[in-house]
Amino acid sequence: MYLHCMKHLVSEDQYKKTKAMVDRFEAPGGPGEVLQQKLLERQEKVENWVLNYWLDDMYLNNRLALPVNSSPAVIFGILVPSVFDFYRFAANLISGVLDYKALLDTHAVPVDFARGQLSGHPLCMKQYYGLFSSYRLPGHTKDTLVAQKSNIMPEPEHIIVACNNQFFVLDVVINFRRLSEGDLFTQLRKIAKMSENEEERLPPIGLLTSDGRTEWAEARTILVEDSTNRDSLDMIERSICLVCLDSPSGEEPTDTNMALQLLHGGGYSKNGANRWYDKPMQFVVGRDGVCGTVCEHSPFDGIVLVQCIEHLLRHMKEGAKKLVRADSVSELPAPRRLRWKCSPEIQGHLASSAEKLQRMVKNLDFIAYKFENYGKEFIKKQKMSPDAYIQVALQLAFYRLYGRLVPTYESASIRRFEEGRVDNIRSATPEALTFVKGMIDEKSSLQDSEKMQQFKDAIAAQTNYTILAITGMAIDNHLLGLREIAREHFKELPDIFTDETYLTSNRFILSTSQVPTTMGMFCCYGPVIPNGYGACYNPQPEHILFCISSFKDCKETSSSKFAKAVGESLMDMKQLCNKCNLPKTTTPTKQGAPSTPRPGSKH
């Protein structure tokens, strides 16, 4: 399968070398057989043989800064400021989080069942328990995902509120009583007032969490030498979640600008230091009505995150109807400000972190592009999977711009398995290449019916690979397992893993995922390599929202050009479907739509 996935993406000479390596690897008595046996032995000993290998490879060994590179954001959509009572909204949100956490603590969250391909299968729920009880600890060479074991540690009964780059402890249970929404409202107002006190203001320590992981680990080592800092770090690391009360960003609230606000906070001068990136859940509530969540991705995947947030938004819709008493009746102890002792060395780290975050803000090329000509209803009428259809459209868009296809990552949930996370659907299939060549290359003198057949073949290849991936039969996790077990047992890695084809196969120039939502919110993330694209999409009945990201310092990439190419590709595919279905249809197709939707910043 590996050879089949890569043959059309590398040169003929390169492929021949790789084929010889693969033959040696899988020969009877060769390294492949030995390693496979070791993997089977590992499978007997652990709940999920790939989980820790995957977690290290995907997240914990990665030294890049979390914002943009790793942490996805979910934007709730603008809440109109006139209706938007800032503190009441934040109090309602916290109360929703506490309700949801109570469901998790009593294991009362209903089991998820698979949707889409092979629907109806129950899914592993373990990821949900990482939402409010884990923490990513920076390490010098590798991070640690700390999961709080409730039987050892007392359950956390506080959240951390970030406001004006200061951090406050908000106890949500006082004298064994959970704070009411009115109480939370009062406490949040106190925090905002305390954060404005200039004399008390402390350095923006949260900035350190936005730096590269090794740099942050070094700074943290210095911080913990002081007991005041140790106590503050402990309070943050053991909290339920963070709520970041943001200042207005000063930008027009377009989807694109709201996404940027969540991805990196606009840098140090805006809200970029009003964060603590190691915490899995940070809820951002902006005074200008921009709100959402930015997540540390290692404990859970996108679908789990979306399920949690949809539950919260439903709670908040209900809560907004109830009239909550504005203030609390009882006298509550004031929230506490977290204190920091800053050595000159830490000041140096802060300056360097601020400068790097600023560079990241300038470098991100991002667009939220709403394709409005049609959505998943049209695709379903073609008897095609909307996900497969959009993946083929992304391949067509890439070929349109670059005249080639590249290794592509599409996350596929493997929660059908105990402790399952994801595997990769390699969407740049040989069938997709045949189809896009037929559509783009001028020399192509194919009939529409031939193009349609190639289109159907590309969709079928994509759909079949998806089914393989979600049932644990894809190649990425298996190759990763063989590679990691080789590291443990062999002096040096078999050459199949140091080969240029294997390295190329893991440099995902297109990193994609479908994150469908129902509540008008959307998800976004950055590219995974310097010359790559991030492409997150959300298919709705009559439109498709794409969040396209790349880096400005890569001259080959452009998010707006890619968004435009996606729009053109989706129009070409619709046209092809309509032409080939014409004889069968009795109703005329809708005319008058623009052939190339403009990736407008207003969308």
Image (cartoon, rainbow, N blue to C red):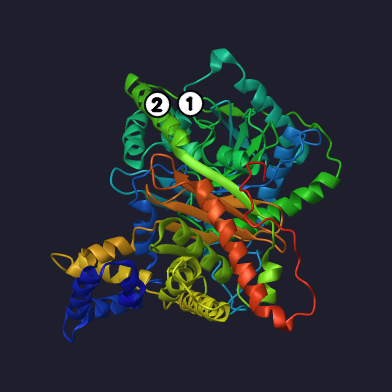
Q: Badge 1: few (under 14), some or many (20 or more) residues near its Cα, within 10 Å?
A: many
Count of residue discs: 2
Q: What is the C-alpha distance between the residues marked 2 and 1?
A: 8 Å
Instruction: Name the residue beneath numbered marker 1.
Output: 204
Q: Is residue 34 above or below residue 271?
A: below
In this view, the residue farthest toward the bottom is 28
Name the side, left or right, on which 53 lies relative to 162: left
Q: Position of residue 344 (x, y in %)?
A: 34, 19
Name the side, left or right, on which 532 lies relative to 320: left
Q: Is residue 589 visible?
A: yes
Looking at this view, is 423 or 573 the one in front?
Answer: 573
Report the residue at 32% width, 40% height from top: 214
Report the residue at 81% width, 45% height from top: 320
Instruction: Name the residue beneath numbered marker 2.
Output: 350
Q: Is residue 124 above or below residue 292?
A: below
When asked about the image quadrant of residue 16, the answer is bottom left
Secondary structure state at the residue bearing disc 1: loop
Q: Are marks 2 and 1 in contact (CB under 8 Å)?
A: yes
Looking at this view, is 358 or 220 the one in front?
Answer: 358
**Residue type at tag 2:** Leu
Secondary structure state at the residue bearing disc 2: helix
Query: Of marks 2 and 1, which one's residue comes earlier in the chain?
Result: 1
Q: Badge 2: few (under 14), some or many (20 or more) residues near its Cα, within 10 Å?
A: many
